[in-house]
Image: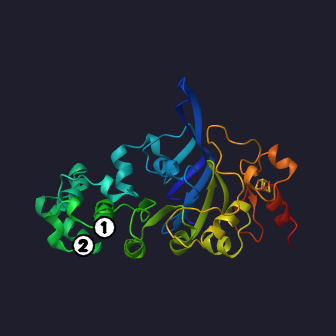
Amino acid sequence: MTAAPLLELRDVRCDFSVERGFLRARRTLRAVDGVSLALRPGETLGIVGESGCGKSTVANLMLGLIRPSAGAVLLSGTPIDRMDRRAVAQRVQPVFQDPYASLNPRKTVRAIVGLPLSVHGAAADPGDAARRVSAMLDMVGLPRHLADSYPGELSGGQRQRVAIARALVLRPNIVVCDEPTSALDVSVQAQILNLLLDLRRELGLAMVFISHNLAVVEHVAQRVAVMYLGRVVEEATAAALFRAARHPYTQALLLSVLTPEPGRGIPDARLGAGFPDPLAPPPGCSFHPRCPLAEARCAATAPALAGRGEGEGTVACHVAGALNSAMP
Ligand code: SF4
């Protein structure tokens, strides 16, 4: 039997009001458009897509940092916006892209990692807090003598280890990692990825791993959702997606994995026109101006998510959907 989701997005929409142009006219930016996702216990869900596809907005929705304009974000079945902010933080914690920006430069490592314990009143006494901070530093592989250092005295990899220790000190059961290795040197990225994988195993964490880099997501995720202009266009187990991507956008992303400069973003993968203006998304299938398989109907009607075939996941594409339904 499939376990109930720990964290779920049900048909979530998220709009922002933004100013545009010389006259600063207000426009609505639909950052997330009808997204449904589920994260089950012990699972790692990868979310991939180009910058501006809405994946970081999804992260902020999952963390309860922003509210959906429509739909629901549920934590073990309870709408997250009806929960106390602290109760959410005890169960869901973030690891962000830039560890330097997310750490207070005036606080020591010990104070940064210990702060959630004092904010949440989670330690029995100062001695208990000190023991838990030391245990956390050991767990993330930071030498204890760095406990009295400031973030500016640490390397990028060490700072990200501090950010991970801070995220885990309350022992949440879900960690949302938003591009956690993108700001790091290539040589350090693998160490941080392997640390996250070890911690997931040791602590039984469920993890959301957001990245523009499919190679990284393949390494860590059991299931992958591909986002384009605020929508999920394909979702499947990592094995199925990397064996046979169905959506033309996913296929283009997979081609881009073979970049000679890993970590430098998505190069031109013969997608034709550039990424569209999110304030004026193309009608129909929003991928149609860049899609090599586009047909007349693609500009008129948005495809719904449908089965990918072989009982593995979903895809939103008129052409890939039709191919799948014709499969034996
Ligand atoms: Fe391409 Fe049409 Fe499929 Fe969109 S629906 S991905 S434009 S073939």
Residue 277: percent from left, percent from top = 63, 42
Q: Quadrant of the N terminus?
A: bottom right
**Up-down: is 252 above or below 300?**
below
What residue is disc 1 on?
Answer: 161
Residue 133 appears in view: yes
Give residue 250's quadrant in the image. Answer: bottom right
Q: Nearer the viewer, residue 270 or 156?
A: 270
The quarter of the image that holds ligand 1 is bottom right
Q: Residue furthest top?
A: 23
Q: Nearer the viewer, residue 223 or 210?
A: 210
Which amino acid does the dot numbered 2 rest on?
A: Leu
What residue lies at 42% left-to-right and 75% top-to-bottom?
190
User: Badge 1: how crowded within 10 Å, few (<14), some, or many (20+)?
Assistant: many
Q: Mark 2 or mark 1, which is nearer the start of the sequence?
A: 2
Residue 319: percent from left, percent from top = 83, 59
Q: Are marks 1 and 2 in contact (CB under 8 Å)?
A: yes
- As drawn, the label of residue 142 is 2
Residue 200 appears in view: no
Relative to 281, 173 lies left or right: left
Helix, strand, or loop for circle 1? helix
Residue 257: percent from left, percent from top = 59, 71
**Up-down: is 288 above or below 177?**
above
Q: CA distance from mark 1 to mark 2?
A: 7 Å
User: Badge 2: how crowded within 10 Å, few (<14), some, or many (20+)?
Assistant: some
Q: Nearer the viewer, residue 113 or 245?
A: 245
**Up-down: is 130 above or below 77?**
below
Label 2, ligand 1: CB separation under 8 Å: no
Q: Quadrant of the C terminus?
A: bottom right
